[in-house]
Image (tube, helix red, strand yellow):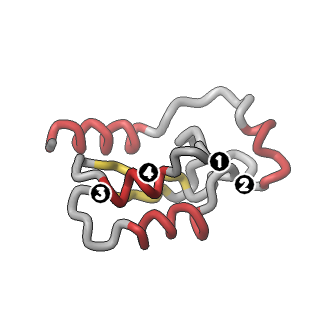
């Protein structure tokens, strides 16, 4: 990934882009990554963002909510949030 930074693609692309993240994601930061992508894409109508409260990196409900427990959290059987699946389907159908 270092050889092909996502930022370069986001700046250059005219294709539709959907960027989603759970706010309890311990692998990608809302303050650094999500906010940076939003800043980079200001004025790009082809890029859409959505942040999901209470969801982790797998778009499942955060059970523990602590960084030290994220590996344990991924072992809890769950399903991807229906809201995320609906949002992705709506976005695809709208394109």
Task: Give the residue at mark 1.
Answer: 62
How far apart are the alpha carbons under marks 2 and 3? Answer: 29 Å
Task: Give the residue at mark 3.
Answer: 47
Locate residue 1 relative to residue 73 in the image: left or right.
Answer: left
In terms of secondary structure, where does tag 3 sit? strand
Q: Residue at x 53, y 30 (%)?
A: 79
Task: Give the residue at mark 2.
Answer: 65
- Sequence-wise, which precedes: disc 2 or disc 3? 3
Q: Are marks 2 and 1 in contact (CB under 8 Å)?
A: yes
Q: Residues within 10 Å of mark 4 (few under 14, many from 20)?
A: some
Task: Give the residue at mark 4.
Answer: 20
The vertical placement of 92 against 28, above or below, is above
- Sequence-wise, which precedes: disc 4 or disc 2? 4
In terms of secondary structure, where does tag 4 sit? strand
Residue 72: percent from left, percent from top: 80, 36
The vertical placement of 72 against 3, above or below, is above
């Amino acid at each position: 990934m270092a050889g092909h930074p996502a930022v370069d693609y986001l700046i250059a692309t005219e294709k539709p882009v959907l960027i989603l993240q759970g706010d309890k994601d311990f692998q990608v930061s809302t303050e650094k990554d999500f906010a940076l992508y939003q800043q980079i894409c200001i004025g790009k109508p082809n890029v859409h963002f959505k942040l999901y409260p209470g969801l982790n990196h797998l778009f499942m409900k955060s059970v523990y909510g602590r960084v030290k427990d994220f590996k344990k959290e991924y072992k809890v059987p769950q399903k991807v949030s229906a809201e995320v699946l609906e949002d992705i389907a709506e976005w695809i159908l709208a394109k």
